[in-house]
Amino acid sequence: MSFLFVAGSLFLFNTIELSVAGQGSTPKIKEIVLGRCYEYQLNTIGPKADNWKDCNEIWEAFHKAFAHKKPCEPKSSDYKPFFEATGMQELSKSLFWSGTYKVAHVYSDSGDRYTTLEDTLAGYLVNGLTWCGKKTDPPSSDGIDYDSCPDRSVCDYTTPFWGLASETFARHARGIARVLLNGSRVDSNGKPTPYRRDSFFAKYELPNLQVDKVSELMIIVAHTRSIPTGCDTDSIGMLKKDAKKRNIKKVTCYDDPNDVRHILCTDTPLSRKCLFLHSDPSMYPRLR
Ligand SMILES: *[C@@H]1O[C@H](CO)[C@@H](O)[C@H](O)[C@H]1NC(C)=O
């Protein structure tokens, strides 16, 4: 049974890997990035603001970092001009996340409630896109490989960008920094691991929080299924220790606080963990 399962998942894994390796850069990436750049500024500062950033300059800085290069060649320093061109404001409502992509972005409400990396201009422009370069002789027209990007086993070509993006984001956090972790994640032994030392949060964000400007690290553990006791786990204990080592003044932890719980319960309002929603039956006449 378990052998079949392993063999089956190996097969599946190979198929997925092949299809991932087959995936090249997002078609029309230039048009998408430029369009997002104008749209973002329209929505955040409005059409009449005089501090619009130059979207062509931003695209050029981004393109130059990886285009006409071998796909594994760009280093995070190559993306520096891009982050200089996009700039970043100080973030008084920063929201870090790990293993909670979907919930974190509903929670942040596109930057209205909190700000995730993907709600900043730099993150927004390329969120969900794939890109890698191509070095050919003679050079191809735009130096971007639309046919395939390297397999993870060849190189991790996305981390030079997203690592620097995460670092930059963390350096701009002020006041309370929130991190939304996944309390339903477990390791291979079934132990809860909402916090992982190999996560982007642990590797690029926590080490770059400015301890004199961050008053509190607020850990929020979201639970998809289990009874919420994430804050008591060894994993969160380790995060608290790591935060202390970094001299972060105050660290707090909350399991499924009500605002997060309401979001989690929008899809499963009748599940056991969502019964709290029905404490006032007059609100739900049909459930009586
Ligand atoms: C936690 O991770 C599991 C497995 O990856 C996922 O199905 C679930 O949606 C995640 N929960 C939250 C709150 O993001």
Image (tube, rainbow, N blue to C red):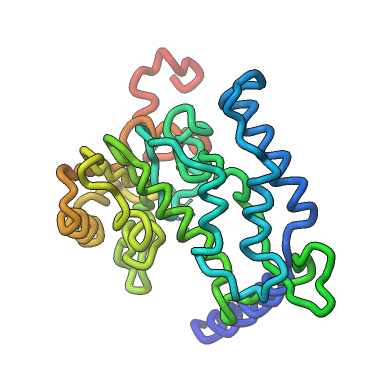
125 sits left or right of 68 in the view: left
Q: Is residue 265 visible?
A: no
Q: Nearer the viewer, residue 197 or 93?
A: 93
Q: Is residue 98 visible?
A: yes
Q: Nearer the viewer, residue 276 or 76?
A: 76
Residue located 77% across and 46% down the image: 31
Residue located 32% across and 59% down the image: 195
User: What quarter of the picture does the C terminus occupy?
Assistant: top left
Relative image position of residue 142 (x, y in whole percent): 79, 62
Relative image position of residue 176 (x, y in whole percent): 28, 36
Relative image position of residue 15 (x, y in whole percent): 69, 76
Q: Residue furthest top?
A: 282
Instruction: Using the rendered view, name the quadrant where residue 177 is placed.
Output: top left
Residue located 52% across and 82% down the image: 1
Q: Is residue 98 above or below residue 56?
A: below
Relative image position of residue 5 (x, y in whole percent): 55, 79
User: How many labels sit on residues?
Assistant: 0
Q: Is residue 162 above or below residue 138?
A: above
Q: Is residue 267 above or below residue 5?
A: above
